[in-house]
């Protein structure tokens, strides 16, 4: 019985690790569609309101994932970002976050 | 000639007074940022306490103004940030955005 519990816990841990794995390399490939706006210093959105797009280099990974989820679900609203986030899987979001969060180990 | 001297003297006085004011006065936005924002976003907005909290240091000035306005109006919603932004004046928002945008931190990574 005890063995079985250990096994279940082990399988759970391994599966969650594999699921949560993010890859900055894959993130880089995905980020090519972001660079057209976010990769240009001082680039400004023109619609619906005019202001500079946020800088993402060095941003916290979990914040990036949360923002993309909120854009995908529509909780956070920006027409361009809503359309782009709708195409992203959870894996894509994790990879993008890993690519932009360059602070690993810096804290 | 007399007029020129007068203008130059006035200019010099203004420059000296300006320098004094800058030295004596606090850096705009810093006091408020230290009081209200640093608890979660870290000193200079550069060391968030949790990974779900964004880094602010170096962020674009007008983006920060936009975000704080959105939270204040309720266009963007977050229990903590909505409450923090509600009492801010336009000037406080501009000063905070200016302060954070001048810190070293985020970059426009390609």
Image (tube, helix red, strand yellow):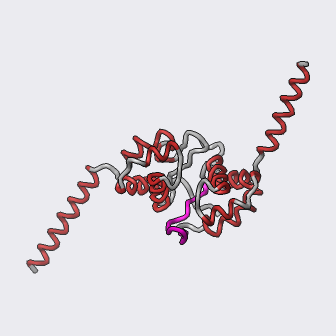
Can you tell which quarter of the image residue B20 is in? bottom left
Q: Position of residue A51 (x, y in %)?
A: 50, 66
Quadrant location, the C terminus of chain A:
top right
Q: Is residue A23 left or right of residue A103?
A: right
Q: Is residue B38 above or below residue A78?
A: above
Magenta residue check for B69: no
Tell me which residue sits at (62%, 53%) in the image: A67
Quadrant location, the N terminus of chain A:
top right
Q: Is residue B108 above or below residue A14?
A: below
Part of the protein shown in magenta? A43-58
Q: Is residue B41 above or below residue B99?
A: above
User: Furthest residue to the bottom?
Assistant: B1
Q: Total label count?
A: 0
Tell me which residue sits at (8%, 78%) in the image: B2
Q: Position of residue B42 (x, y in %)?
A: 50, 42
Tell me which residue sits at (87%, 33%) in the image: A11
Tell me which residue sits at (55%, 43%) in the image: B48
Q: Nearer the viewer, residue B83 or A42?
A: B83
Magenta residue check for A47: yes
Q: Nearer the viewer, residue A90 or B101?
A: A90
Q: Position of residue A56 (x, y in %)?
A: 60, 57
Q: Is residue B45 left or right of residue A76?
A: left
Q: Position of residue B87 (x, y in %)?
A: 38, 47
User: Furthest residue to the top?
Assistant: A2
Q: Does the rendering let one see residue B103?
A: no
Q: Is residue B100 left or right of residue B28?
A: right
Q: Does the rendering let one see residue B5?
A: yes
**Magenta region, main secondary structure:** loop
Q: Nearer the viewer, residue A83 or B56?
A: A83
């Amino acid at each position: 019985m005890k063995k079985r519990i250990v096994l279940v816990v082990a399988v759970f841990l391994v599966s969650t690790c594999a699921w949560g794995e993010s890859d900055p390399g894959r993130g880089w490939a995905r980020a090519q569609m972001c660079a057209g706006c976010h990769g240009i210093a001082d680039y400004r959105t023109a619609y619906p309101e005019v202001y500079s797009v946020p800088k993402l280099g060095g941003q916290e990974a979990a914040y990036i994932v949360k923002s993309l989820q909120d854009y995908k679900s529509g909780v956070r609203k920006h027409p361009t970002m809503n359309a782009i986030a709708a195409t992203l899987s959870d894996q894509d979001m994790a990879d993008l976050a890993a690519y932009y969060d360059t602070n690993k180990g810096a804290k | 000639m007399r007029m020129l001297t007068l203008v130059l003297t006035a200019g010099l006085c203004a420059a000296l007074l300006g320098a004094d004011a800058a030295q004596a006065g606090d850096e705009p936005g810093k006091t408020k940022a230290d009081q209200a924002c640093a608890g979660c976003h870290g000193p200079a907005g550069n060391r968030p306490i949790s990974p779900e909290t964004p880094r602010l240091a170096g962020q674009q000035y007008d983006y920060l103004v936009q975000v704080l306005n959105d939270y204040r109006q309720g266009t963007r919603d977050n229990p903590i940030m909505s409450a923090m932004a509600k009492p801010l004046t336009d000037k406080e928002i501009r000063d905070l955005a200016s302060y954070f945008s001048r810190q070293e931190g985020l970059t426009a990574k390609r």
